[in-house]
Image (tube, rainbow, N blue to C red):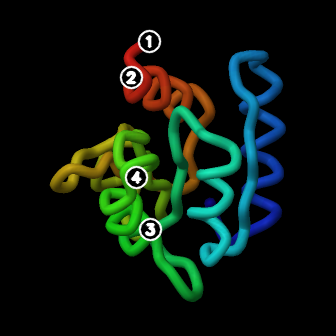
């Protein structure tokens, strides 16, 4: 879930190209929860800064929803600088944050870690 269609299109292409993932893109945060109920993702990639509901709002709503509360979340954000994280995912509370722009090897490793693979 990101409000930048160009970014999500590229991310979807690259993730599906690995042959390991089926990706559903939602660029409107107000439709994200409904899309998660319909699609049933194993993991959610969310941006923090979005119009209407931000990533933090979505995570809070997911935690209140019995069907969604166990879905692991990776937050992709420009609010965290790569220089702060050394280009690696960082934990902030109970959220895993990844600085944009993210490299595919870093993202794939974070996804696999979140999914326990």
- Asked if 61 appears above or below 73 in the picture, the reply is below
**Quadrant of image for the N terminus:** bottom right
Q: Which residue is mark 4?
A: 82
Residue 21: name its quadrant.
Answer: top right
Q: Residues within 10 Å of mark 2 (few under 14, many from 20)?
A: few
Q: Nearer the viewer, residue 56 or 104?
A: 56
Marks 4 and 1, the one that precedes in the sequence: 4
Between the residue at mark 4 and the residue at mark 2, the CA separation in whole angstroms equals 19 Å
Residue found at x 44% / y 68%? 58
Q: CA distance from mark 4 to mark 1?
A: 25 Å
Q: Residues within 10 Å of mark 1 (few under 14, many from 20)?
A: few
Q: Quick one: SS at disc 4?
A: helix
Q: What residue is pinned by disc 1?
A: 117
**First in sequence: mark 1 or mark 3?**
3
Q: Nearer the viewer, residue 5 or 38?
A: 38
Mark 2: secondary structure? helix
Which disc number belongs to residue 36? none
What number is the disc on residue 113?
2
Q: Check contact, mark 1 vs mark 2: CB within 8 A.
A: yes
In the image, farthest residue toward the top: 117
Residue designated by label 3 = 58
Crowding near the residue tagged with mark 3, few <14, some 14–19, many ≥20 C-alpha atoms within 10 Å = some
> At x 47% / y 77%, what residue is drawn?
54
């Amino acid at each position: 879930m990101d409000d930048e269609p160009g970014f999500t299109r590229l991310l979807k292409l690259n993730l599906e190209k690995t042959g390991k993932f089926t990706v559903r893109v939602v660029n409107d945060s107000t439709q994200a929860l409904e899309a998660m109920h319909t699609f049933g993702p194993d993991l959610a990639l969310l941006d923090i800064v979005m119009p209407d509901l931000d990533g933090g709002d979505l995570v809070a709503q997911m935690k209140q929803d019995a069907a969604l509360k166990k879905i692991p979340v990776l937050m992709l954000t420009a609010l965290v600088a790569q220089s702060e994280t050394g280009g690696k995912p960082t934990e902030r509370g109970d959220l895993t944050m990844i600085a944009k722009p993210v490299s595919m090897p870093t993202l794939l490793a974070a996804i696999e870690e979140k999914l326990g693979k």
